[in-house]
């Protein structure tokens, strides 16, 4: 009885909680997409709090049938998910926006996939997705394009050790942001990351003065925008740069200022870097104990995160050598094993260490080491032969390409001369006369197209008038608009053009335009100063691409080549 006594109050309590929970859940979907996104980011790094907003965002997007917002919801959910599940969400984001030309999607989804693959050490897949993202963004979102280009540069610099190649990309990004308000909320953070990338690349290349220049520039910008994390990164990076200048004490001061902030922001990668350069500074001051202590901290962070780049690998040979000299074989073996493990992981993911193993170790079999050395030398000789063969192939390929280019130029020149020898005006007169009389020569065609003889003659005459009055120079002309002008059926016009002009309607219009363009460019030097885009509009095309394609199809050469040859040919009428 006592139990049943409390059943009803308990039921009422639970039911009231259920009712109160329902409006709360439903109320989220009443919020706008902007409000849901704001609440999501306000709870950043608090997954349980972020998840309801992301789910509500998705529910709202599905209900309202908005594919871009649906993709954004999947993107937000991917940020809260483990790697494989994140890839599933991102594939969904790509699926719903693959045929759209949105400013963000599907480029952002491909870029996010690249980051997931990068965390999995799948660098080939990461680069593939970054390149797809870059190509899509290039079409309609320059800011996103350069953000992705920066990501590719950072991957090449930090993960693959391709510093010079990365530096070129960093400079392209820097030039892009130079034209922006780099202290605005939109551009300040990506711009500061680019400055850091430049400083870090120059540091890696041991160009210390350039590294200092960009570190100082970044420090000033981060102060101006109150960006504490990037400010700490520039301080840390300059500390590392000072080590290359052998200014070890000042380097330690900078690193010690930056380290607490980097730890506060839970930036494990740069925390590892701070301990590494602290160790290098102590080693420069000949304080081996402190150097070892900090190299061990580097290893501790790697053990937790399983992430390290070639830049920070030299700590392991240092530890191996230190413990060997102190007779500590246990720790010597521990760090030797760890070093070989990391080397194996890096090699399996299409990477090479920046340096080969640089340490000495005891071995019971000196002959094995000797045989390995001989084998290595033999492999080097074999590589040399392959290199020579490869160079020969390159020379032959370049020779072949040069010969091909020579043939192309010769062919282009022959086509140009043929065009110049043609009396265009005479051709136009002959063509017009032929077209007026063409029906007499082609009466047999009347039956095949099933159009009245008188109507055919009328349309042919109207086509001749159309050509003589340069009606083809009107932009956006279609077979329907021309048929309306002729006051006839568009099927009749199409059939007559196909049979009597022996072309499709588009070919017919384009050929008339190009023939007129050739005559005009030969006769009017003023037109030869126009850009290709301006010429396209002048001769009835909508854009430079369609004009160039039609010109090449008609003449076999590009309009830029034709213009250049006209300018270089003497005695052209002006």
Image (cartoon, rainbow, N blue to C red):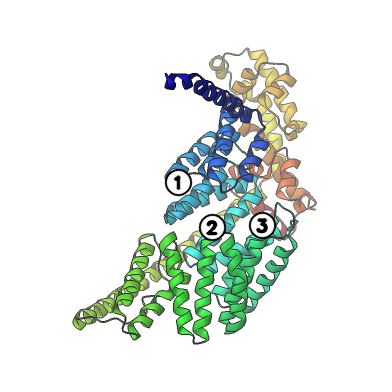
Residue identifier under label 1: 82
The x and y percentages for residue 427 are: 68, 39
- Earlier residue among tags 1 and 2: 1
Q: Exactly how many numbered labels are in the figure?
A: 3
For image coordinates 54% across by 71% down, the residue present is: 274
Q: Nearer the viewer, residue 236 or 7?
A: 7
Residue identifier under label 2: 152
Q: Is residue 298 above or below residue 492?
A: below
Q: Residue furthest front?
A: 2
Residue neighbourhood size for the residue with mark 3, other residues' Cα within 10 Å, grouped as few (<14), some (14–19), many (≥20): some
Q: Give the SS element for disc 1.
A: loop
The x and y percentages for residue 477 are: 70, 29
Residue neighbourhood size for the residue with mark 1, other residues' Cα within 10 Å, grouped as few (<14), some (14–19), many (≥20): few
Q: Give the SS element for disc 2.
A: helix
Q: Quadrant of the N terminus?
A: top left
Residue identifier under label 3: 189
The x and y percentages for residue 331 are: 33, 75
Q: Is residue 502 visible?
A: no
Mark 3 and mark 1: span between their CA atoms?
26 Å
The x and y percentages for residue 310 are: 45, 69
Q: Is residue 332 above or below residue 564?
A: below
For image coordinates 66% across by 70% down, the residue present is: 214
Name which quarter of the figure residue 230 lies in: bottom right
Q: Nearer the viewer, residue 460 or 134?
A: 134
Q: Is residue 8 visible?
A: yes
């Amino acid at each position: 009885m006592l139990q049943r006594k409390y059943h009803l109050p308990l039921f009422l309590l639970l039911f009231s909680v259920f009712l109160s929970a329902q409006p709360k859940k439903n109320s989220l979907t009443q919020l706008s997409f902007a409000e849901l996104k704001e609440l999501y980011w306000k709870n950043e790094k608090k997954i349980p709090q972020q998840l309801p907003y992301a789910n509500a965002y998705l529910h709202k997007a599905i209900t309202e049938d908005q594919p871009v917002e649906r993709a954004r919801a999947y993107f937000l959910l991917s940020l809260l998910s483990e790697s494989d599940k994140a890839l599933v969400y991102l594939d969904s984001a790509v699926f719903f926006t693959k045929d759209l030309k949105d400013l963000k999607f599907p480029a952002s989804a491909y870029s996010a996939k690249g980051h997931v693959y990068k965390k999995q050490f799948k660098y080939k897949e990461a680069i593939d997705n970054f390149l797809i993202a870059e190509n899509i963004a290039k079409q309609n979102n320059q800011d996103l394009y350069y953000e992705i280009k920066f990501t590719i540069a950072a991957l090449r610099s930090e993960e693959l050790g391709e510093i010079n190649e990365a530096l070129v990309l960093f400079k392209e990004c820097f030039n892009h942001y130079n034209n922006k308000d780099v202290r605005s909320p939109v551009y300040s953070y990506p711009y500061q990351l680019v400055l850091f990338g430049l400083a870090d690349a120059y540091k890696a290349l041991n160009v210390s003065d350039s590294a200092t220049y960009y570190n100082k520039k970044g420090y000033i910008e981060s102060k101006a925008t109150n960006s504490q994390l990037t400010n700490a990164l520039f301080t840390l990076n300059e500390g590392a740069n000072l080590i290359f200048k052998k200014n070890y004490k000042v380097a330690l001061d900078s690193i010690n200022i930056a380290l607490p902030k980097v730890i506060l922001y839970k930036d494990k990668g740069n925390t590892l870097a701070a301990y590494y350069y602290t160790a290098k500074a102590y080693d420069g001051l000949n304080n081996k104990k402190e150097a070892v202590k900090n190299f061990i901290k580097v290893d501790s962070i790697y053990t937790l995160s399983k992430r390290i780049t070639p830049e920070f690998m030299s700590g392991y040979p240092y530890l191996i050598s230190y413990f060997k000299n102190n007779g500590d074989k246990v720790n010597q073996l521990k760090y030797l094993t760890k070093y070989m493990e990391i080397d194996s992981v890096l090699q399996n993911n299409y990477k090479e260490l920046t340096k080969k193993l640089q340490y000495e170790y005891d071995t019971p079999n000196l002959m094995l080491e000797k045989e390995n050395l001989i084998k290595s030398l033999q492999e080097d000789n074999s590589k040399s032969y392959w290199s020579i063969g490869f160079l020969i192939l390159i020379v032959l390929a370049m020779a072949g390409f040069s010969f091909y280019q020579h043939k192309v130029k010769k062919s282009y020149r022959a086509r140009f001369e043929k065009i110049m020898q043609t009396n265009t005006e005479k051709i136009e007169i002959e063509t017009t006369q032929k077209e007026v009389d063409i029906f007499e020569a082609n009466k047999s065609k009347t039956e095949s197209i099933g159009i009245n003889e008188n109507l055919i003659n009328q349309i042919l005459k109207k086509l001749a008038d159309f050509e003589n009055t340069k009606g083809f120079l009107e932009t956006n002309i279609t077979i329907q608009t021309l048929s309306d002008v002729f006051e006839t059926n568009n099927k009749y016009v199409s059939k007559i053009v196909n049979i009597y002009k022996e072309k499709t309607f588009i070919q017919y219009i384009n050929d008339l335009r190009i023939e007129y363009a050739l005559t005009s460019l030969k006769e009017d030097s003023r037109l030869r100063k126009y850009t290709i885009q301006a010429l396209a509009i002048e001769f009835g095309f909508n854009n430079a691409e369609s004009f160039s394609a039609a010109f090449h199809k008609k003449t076999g050469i590009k309009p830029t080549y034709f213009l250049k040859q006209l300018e270089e040919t003497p005695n052209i009428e002006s």
